[in-house]
Image (tube, grey):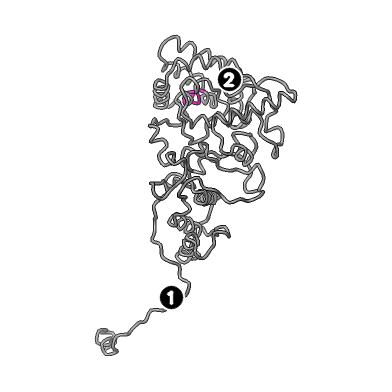
Amino acid sequence: MSQITFAFDSPVAAATDPAVAFEIGWDFAHFGLTPPADQLIASGPLRQGWDAACASFGTRTLAPTRHTRKWLQLRLNAWRRGRVFEGLQVTPNYLRQIDVERCPITREALTQATCTPSDASIDRVRNDAGYAAGNLVVMSTRANVAKGEVDFDDALAQMRRVEATALSQGGGEGAMRADGAPILRFASSQDAARESTPLSAAEWARIAVLCSFVTELPHAQAAALPLLVLPPNRLRLFNPIQALQALVTRQFEKPGWSTRIARLAELLPGKSLRRDFHVFVNALVPRVLEAGQPGSAHQMRWALEDAWRNALVLRCWKRVALQFDATLAERTVLRASALHLADRAALATSFEQATDGWGIAQRGYASLDTATANVPPRRPRPAPRTTPAPAPIFVPAHRDARLAASPAMR
């Protein structure tokens, strides 16, 4: 793969901030790791931080984990590209929490550091934001490279182009678009090795739904989207109706779902809405059961996602979802969370709070003349010594004074 120099769109790139580079170099040394060779320039701030930490820690370093290495790599990439890195919440522990074994887009098993398209990589779902908590997802390198800088609308357009190409070449029918229209049925990615091939229409549809989670959409548009991919862990959902959609769908991951569904129905206002909700559930359940008894958690996840490809399921859901507005959907999710009907706690925040530290105002680029989400310096910045420091000179006290001061010597 050819290498190019990054061209920064921001007038002032984060790579010009020596304090950020010093911190990165320091943490490389703190974990006993060596930065990339192109960063070991003697006069560079990253090298200075690395040298200062090496002198400070010596061999007393921490053992790096896989997530620590990924954390350092992300910070270095963000600094090189002039991107915001939200360092308060994005930690090695956070990266461990969002880690997955299967790519949510291609469904292939993820590998680690094998330099193949199946390697796990971390993607910024919203490209006009930085590396921030709530905007990061683990997927395969193949899916990440294909996604690139596309957003929700771009992914839908790409899905339609792939579908049109497949139609012109002759193909079958089935499946469903992310917007509810019929599309082709493609072989599932877990059954075929497609490491070097482009993404299918079904995979582009998953990317579109993934991007929709962090895109503010009109309520009617968000209500019409099938849940072709369940929201990854720690991803922030901007559309309340999709949060409710995910909450209902996840009920079927664990036994006892019928009791929980009945309690959810009791939270809905009006007999008409509760009746339509039960009709939707009765349409969804058979499609999940058609997949058979899942042998693992990811197979159960795929069965739930694939159930949403059925036109009847989406039609019944739209009848339910359009009776909500964003406020009612949000209130229902919060009440269900308070009753422990969700598999995780729900918290409602404003858009400004949800995107705090994302750098959306500057499209994800950090600049020195605006406040960024980079962690402030945590330690002094001593300049690395190029020559050994002279030994201190000790002037002993007068011999008679030492004898007088020490009774044992009398």
Decide: is 146 above or below 12.
Answer: above
Q: Position of residue 356 (x, y in %)?
A: 40, 39
**Mark 1 belongs to which amino acid?**
Ala
The residue that mark 1 highlights is 389
The numbered mark at residue 22 is none
Q: Position of residue 165 (x, y in %)?
A: 70, 27
**Mark 2 belongs to which amino acid?**
Gly
**Residue 259 lies in the magenta-colored region:** no
> Which residue is depicted at the point 38% across and 46% down?
371
Q: Nearer the viewer, residue 93 or 260?
A: 93
Q: Which region shows up in magenta?
A: 243-248
Give the quadrant of the C terminus. Answer: bottom left
Q: Position of residue 396 (x, y in %)?
A: 32, 85
The residue that mark 2 highlights is 180
> Which residue is depicted at the point 41% across and 35% down?
354
Q: Magenta stretch mostly in which secondary structure? A: helix
